[in-house]
Amino acid sequence: MMPFESLAIAAPIIFVAYAVFGMTGFGAAMVAVPLLVQFFPLQFAVPLVVLFDLVCTALVGGRNWRQVSRNEIKRLLPWMLLGIVLGVTLLSNAGARWPLMLLGGFVLAVCIKGLFGTPAKTTAPMSSLWALPFGAFGGIFSALFGTGGPIYTIYLSRRLDALDQFRATISVVILLSGLIRAVAFGTAGLYFQPGILAVAAVLLPVALLGLLAGSRLRTRLPADLLKRSILVLLAIAGAGAIYRGWLAPA
């Protein structure tokens, strides 16, 4: 079982991460993992967060099944599976330095684009052939860092015009990704690490409280302020992951 001091560190991180999820519908892992890896191994933090993602995504997205684009799910799923298998293999065998620095760099790139980038003006739909690279890289980043959501979002936002259909589909994609990763992590033995399931049981109520708080805050804060605050938080977490990776042995 994780010492009390470690639980005291992890609990507020999980609460904030799932408050972000409650406000936006995604982004929990992008907040939680870069912060958790300051204190815990990457191979412990990622499988832990996947368990919370499964529960919270099922609660949020389970009400919109009828609006899901099954065609896009069928296009993404095979390549997502391939990417997750590759990512789990890397997570089980890689050293800490480069995965952490890659995670931090990816999170910072997403934040910089969100803070300073301009929205794309093109309305032309993306070719369905892009499902291969977006599905594969989304699977790799999901398995390594739990941060594949933005990659899937880029693809689906250019494929689906209806906002409700997009939201329902991205929720199911993330849920399926979580289920596949949980099975893959279990097969790789990552859920046999001492204390990980006990820690998940202790921190799950914290994640649910964060989800509830974020869901209530969503309607009370200005959208632009909310977006920028989350991106700044993510940028800090990403920079911390790079620093932690730099200090880690190669």
Image (spheres, helix red, strand yellow):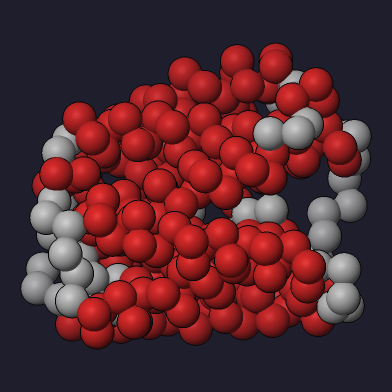
Along the line of sight, which residue is nearer the eye, 152 or 44?
Answer: 44
Lateral position of residue 5 relative to residue 126, left or right: left
Q: Quadrant of the C terminus?
A: bottom left
Q: How many marks?
A: 0
Along the line of sight, which residue is nearer the eye, 24 or 166?
Answer: 24
Q: Position of residue 197 (x, y in %)?
A: 26, 51
Residue 43 vertical placement versus 184 (above, below): below
Does residue 173 appear anywhere in the picture? yes
Q: Residue at x 46, y 52 (%)?
A: 52
Lateral position of residue 232 relative to residue 169, left or right: left
Lateral position of residue 151 relative to residue 136, left or right: right
Along the line of sight, which residue is nearer the eye, 231 or 33?
Answer: 33
Q: Residue at x 68, y 70 (%)?
A: 213
Q: Position of residue 23 (x, y in %)?
A: 73, 64
Residue 34 vertical placement versus 162 (above, below): below
Q: Residue at x 46, y 24 (%)?
A: 79
Q: Position of residue 111 (x, y in %)?
A: 61, 71
Does residue 83 appear anywhere in the picture? no
Q: Quadrant of the N terminus?
A: bottom left
Q: Position of residue 142 (x, y in %)?
A: 43, 45
**Quarter of the figure with residue 241:** bottom left
